Amino acid sequence: MSGGIALIDCWAPWCGACKGFTPTFEAAAERFPNHTFAKLNTQDQGELAKKLKVTHIPTIILFRDGLLLLRRPGYLSDTEIDEVIGTAEGLDMERVRADMEERVAAESG
């Protein structure tokens, strides 16, 4: 995930809320064909889910240009997904990277 926006739906087959969210997620993928949409089955991919710090499902994770920008548990509406993607699209990624570097330096300093 080095370039662009990627939205990941973290789910499990036994999760009713996850099943309910699937049509919303699929509709967003159709509205934003220039972005990557993926589903992560946390039951089958437990190690990856753990690395991504997924503790509740459903959880939406958003990357832009390889940077994790959002990890949000819970169900998102169509409007919320559109807002999240719109915000990510509008970010100045050079500024985001500089802010992250400053934060890391301050925490280790």
Image (cartoon, rainbow, N blue to C red):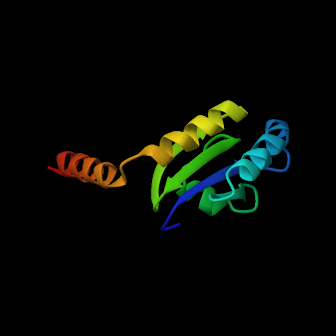
Name the quadrant containing residue 57: top right
Residue 11 in view (yes/no): no
Nearer-the-camera pick, 25 or 53: 25
Residue at the spot x=61%, y=43% of the render? 55
- Whether 46 is drawn above or below 61: the answer is below
Residue 95, percent across and down? 29, 49
Q: Residue at the bottom extreme?
A: 2
Nearer-the-camera pick, 11 or 5: 5
Residue 71, percent across and down? 54, 43
Residue at the spot x=21%, y=49% of the render? 102
Residue at the spot x=36%, y=53% of the render? 93
Residue 20 in view (yes/no): yes
Residue at the spot x=56%, y=39% of the render? 84
95 to the left or right of 71: left
Name the quadrant containing residue 36: bottom right
Residue 30, percent across and down? 76, 52
35 to the left or right of 44: left
67 to the left or right of 62: left
Callout count: 0
Residue 16, percent across and down? 85, 37
